[in-house]
Amino acid sequence: MEVTIVLSRREVAGILLIAGQLANEGFNLVLKEIVQQERPHMHLGDGYGMPSSHSQFMTFFVTFTVVYLETHITTNAIHKRAVQAGAIALGLLVMVSRVYLGYHTTLQVIAGGIVGICSGCVWLWLVERAIYASKFVDIVLDWPVCKWLLIRDSRNVQDIALAEYKLSRHAASSFKTK
């Protein structure tokens, strides 16, 4: 999902989300090796069950999505709340399904959820306080490879959807008149 967003949008936020998800996944593997708690039904799934990697993945994603939208999207509050609610609902559905399908115990899913939320908060803090505050993104965006790939950072554009809409309408009308 995130890869599709990065390839189509070429946004720094999407790249940072993927980097955070990969770090979160690595953290999950380390935690599973430390805890070494079996799954409720060993014939379902490979490896240890604590914490649930699906729950951890989804709550990381939900945390990043909800907080990013809250802090960087200032227009269209109804749309923002709908996307946030949808992300939360999707996360909860994944968590419930892991228990319902017998892949994890309730405790494994809750633990994964808590770790994912905490990891998401830590990652967001690092992104805002270390990566953006240090102007690292601005430096990287000036690299020739980023210019060639058209990597962009639109987090400070007031309403990116409206800006892109107007630009595409203008480009389309300019093309028709030629």
Image (cartoon, rainbow, N blue to C red):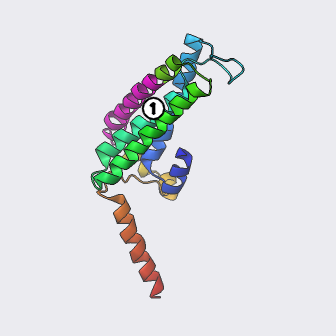
Q: Which residue is situated farthest in the bottom direction here? A: 178
Task: Indicate the secondary structure of the residue bearing disc 1.
Answer: helix
Residue shown at the point (55%, 17%) measured from the top left:
50
Using the rendered view, name the quadrant where residue 47 is placed: top right
Using the rendered view, name the quadrant where residue 37 is placed: top right
Residue shown at the point (56%, 25%) measured from the top left:
99
Of the pair 99 and 148, the residue shown nearer to us: 99
Is residue 94 shown above or below 118? below
How far across and how far down the image is residue 94, in percent? 53, 34
Residue shown at the point (56%, 11%) measured from the top left:
34
Q: Which residue is situated farthest in the right direction here? A: 43
Q: Mark 1 points at which residue?
A: 59
The answer to whether 55 appears left or right of 167 in the picture is right
**Part of the protein shown in magenta:** 113-135
Residue 116 drawn in magenta: yes
Of the pair 100 and 132, the residue shown nearer to us: 100
How far across and how far down the image is residue 7, in percent? 54, 53
Is residue 109 shown above or below 158? above
